[in-house]
Image: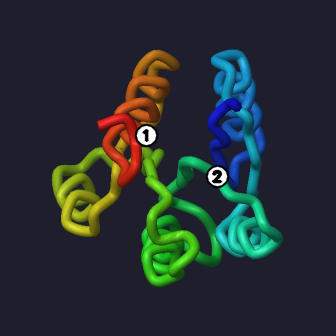
Amino acid sequence: MPCRVMVVEDEPENRLFIGLMLRTEGYEVVEAEDGPTAFRILEGGAHPDLILLDVMMPGLNGWQVFQRLREDPTAARIPVVMLTALAQRADVERAVELGVDGYLTKPFEPADLIHTIEEALTHRPGGGE
């Protein structure tokens, strides 16, 4: 059974590109254009194995979405990889402090995205290690 990845990205072109890339690699993809949509999808019973989460989004930003995910008992254990143009040291440190499972800055190479996803899935509770 393929791993299911939820892509939470407000830019349609980025969502399409990431979705195509992941499907090509054999992942099942669920797309959400913002945080509220992601929560509706989760509440509807979608159980992704991993969430790719953009940081800079209108309304709820990625940091806020991540905090809410960690407060939700059904979503708290889902690994989260942040995708962002924020490459400052303070942003990376914030992600580490919050317990983000992976952090990838845009633009990124497809191989780097796949590697980051595989790392996060391997190190999740109940994962490959």
Check the image and report above or below for 127 versus 45: above
Which picture quadrant has residue 80? bottom left
Between 119 and 126, the one nearer to me in the picture: 126
Using residue 53 as the reference point, say whether residue 67 is left or right of it: left
Give the image location of residue 50, x and y in percent. 54, 48
Give the image location of residue 120, x and y in percent. 38, 41
Q: Which residue is mark 1?
A: 121
Q: How is the image coloured?
A: rainbow
Using residue 103 as the reference point, say whether residue 81 is left or right of it: right
Between 125 and 96, the one nearer to me in the picture: 125
Give the quarter of the figure containing the N terminus. top right
Q: How many marks?
A: 2
Which picture quadrant has residue 16? top right
Check the image and report above or below for 121 versus 96: above
Give the image location of residue 128, x and y in percent. 37, 35
Which picture quadrant has residue 60? bottom right
The tag on residue 86 is none
Callout 2 secondary element: loop
Residue type, numbered disc 2: Pro
- Disc 2: CA contacts within 10 A as few (<14), some (14-19) or many (>=20): some
Report the residue at 57% width, 74% height from top: 74
Between 48 and 30, the one nearer to me in the picture: 48
Q: CA distance from mark 1 to mark 2?
A: 11 Å
Give the quarter of the figure containing the C terminus. top left
Report the residue at 23% width, 64% height from top: 94
Report the residue at 68% width, 58% height from top: 47
Q: Which residue is mark 2?
A: 48
Q: Earlier in the sequence, mark 1 or mark 2?
A: 2
Callout 1 secondary element: helix
